[in-house]
Amino acid sequence: MKVLFVCKSSPKYGIVPFIRRQGESINKQGVGLDFYTVKGHGIIGYLKQIRQLSSHIKNNNYDIIHAHYGLIGLLCGLSFSGLPIVLSVMGSDAYGRFNTRGKRIFNSYFIMLLTQISLLFSSRIIVKSKNILDFIPHKKKAQILPNGVDFELFKPTSNNLVKNRVLCLCDPKDSRKNFKLVKEAMSLINDDNIQLINPFPIEPNNFPKYLNESSVFVLSSYNEGSPNVIKEAMACNIPVISTDVGDVKEIIHNVEGCYITSFNPEDLANKIKKVISLNKRTEGRKNIKHLNSIIIAKKIINIYSKILKK
């Protein structure tokens, strides 16, 4: 079996880390896999690469295409390769993007529409969480399968936490990430001994170090699918405080030291102070053992196999 992973890439950040890791974990299971990166911007930039992608597919002996993100799925479909397409719908491609007030941005509806068109080309659709599935009309073709976590990379490195350090990893300019909520909460705490760090952008392999050197990881988004950073924090046994987005509530359920916060800065501030006062690791790693990247890779390979047997 030979698979082509088609995904976005940027000159500055390259392939999104969790997509690269997923491909590498599948390859380690004995499946031949190549990456094809789309470097264009927007729908016009993507469509200009149809001929190039089509040529690449024809010149290589692939059995299946795995597209990541709705517009990428559309690009793969319009290449008319004749190969089955597995489409991973990520989140914002299904439900849109949001402004600083938590309202959907109008031009998101166009991206959502194109994602719906891309579903028509897909043999199988992978969604990362239940809330994304709500936007998928083709339920019979869809399967909920979160991204896996590399348990060798993300693991506790000591039994102690670095006290008074709040970690938030997001693009402050991305309104959907709602970084202002964290800043407002920290202003309410108003304690010079408690440090907020947001090392964005970050070298992906350095993220475990930042996690293990923090008291708590905070996610403040308006919307998410199945945020990888939450699972990675859990794998390191780091306390998590998050808004109720995607599958976060399910992932942190019943884990002592992990909390869901409202969008009220005072609520978030109180929970940050509570976690810091406890000053201990969680047992989150046990809660996500089913999301080990090896297990997820085998499930994806099983999807490929079933498609090719038809």
Image (tube, grey):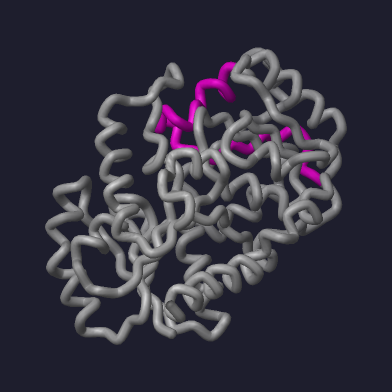
Splitting the image into 4 quarters, where does residue 307 fall? bottom left
Q: Which residue appears at 29% of the width and 59% of the height? A: 121
For residue 210, above or below residue 102: below
Viewer-nearest residue: 290 or 82 = 82
The quarter of the rendered structure image containing the N terminus is: bottom left
Whether 183 is among the magenta residues is: yes
Say above or below: 280 vs 155.
Answer: above
Give residue 19's position: percent from left, percent from top: 46, 61
In the foreground, 136 or 188: 136
Residue at the (50%, 79%) spot, across then down: 27
Query: Where's the C terminus, which quadrant?
Result: bottom left
User: Would you place residue 203 above or below residue 275 in this image?
Assistant: below
In the rendered picture of this protein, how many numbered marks are placed on residues? 0
Residue 309 drawn at (x, y percent): 46, 81
Boundaries of the magenta span: 161-184
Q: At x 78% / y 52%, what residue is drawn? A: 287
